[in-house]
Image (spheres, rainbow, N blue to C red):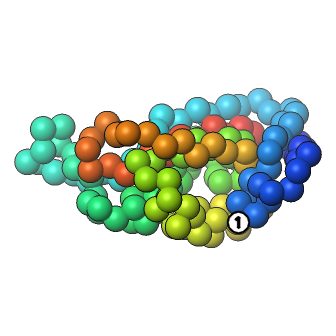
Amino acid sequence: MERTAVNPTEWGLGFFMNQGEITEGATRHLRCSGQVALVPDPEAEMGLSPAPVGDIRGQIEAALASVDELLAGADMDRSNIVFINFFTTDIDEFLANYDVYASWIEPAGVMPPQSLIGVARLVMPDLLVEIEVQAAT
């Protein structure tokens, strides 16, 4: 797969993202549902609870770890990510902890286009972050 960055302006480069990206020659595509920070909890209605509660940094780390698991399950890695959506209930706090994502994606050598979307609430009230990725090989 060949990737060509499209950056009419360069402000996104500081956020480890291209404004656009052309991918050519991809034969496999992975679209992931939103990944969140959940841990098994037999007491919870769905058998899962958000954790760590109130810790956006910890939730970003946990959601990215889930993304890594999904990618590995598809015989892919971070370098295969071609797009990311971040959903958060607190954009300011997410941006204050953006270094978690930056240090996670930088070793992969890619800067996939992304969107950061503020929402009123996620599927469970204590969730602060949800991350969707698309990947290709």
Q: Position of residue 51 (x, y in %)?
A: 28, 58
Q: Residue at x 26, y 44 (%)?
A: 125
Q: Residue at x 67, y 45 (%)?
A: 114
Quadrant of image for the C terminus: top right
Q: Residue at x 86, y 37 (%)?
A: 22
Quadrant of image for the N terminus: top right
- The answer to which of 49 and 14 lies nearer the viewer is 14
Q: Is residue 38 left or right of residue 85?
A: left
- The answer to which of 56 and 39 lies nearer the viewer is 56
Is residue 110 in view from this perspective?
A: no
- The answer to which of 85 and 78 lies nearer the viewer is 85
Q: Is residue 121 left or right of residue 32?
A: left
How many numbered discs?
Answer: 1
Q: Position of residue 36 (x, y in %)?
A: 39, 47
> Circle 1 sits on which residue?
106
Q: Is residue 110 left or right of residue 84?
A: right
- Label 1: few (<14), some or many (≥20) within 10 Å? some
What kind of residue is marked 1?
Glu
Location of residue 46 by image quarter: top left
| Residue 81, placed above or below residue 13 | above
Q: Position of residue 45 (x, y in %)?
A: 12, 38
| Residue 42, placed above or below residue 59 | above
Q: Position of residue 56 (x, y in %)?
A: 40, 61
Q: Residue at x 71, y 38 (%)?
A: 136
| Residue 104, placed above or below residue 35 | below
Q: Which residue, as the protein is rendered here, is positioned at the far left? A: 43
Is residue 81 in view from this perspective?
A: yes
| Residue 29, placed above or below residue 40 | above
Kindly state the secondary structure of the residue where label 1 is placed.
Answer: helix
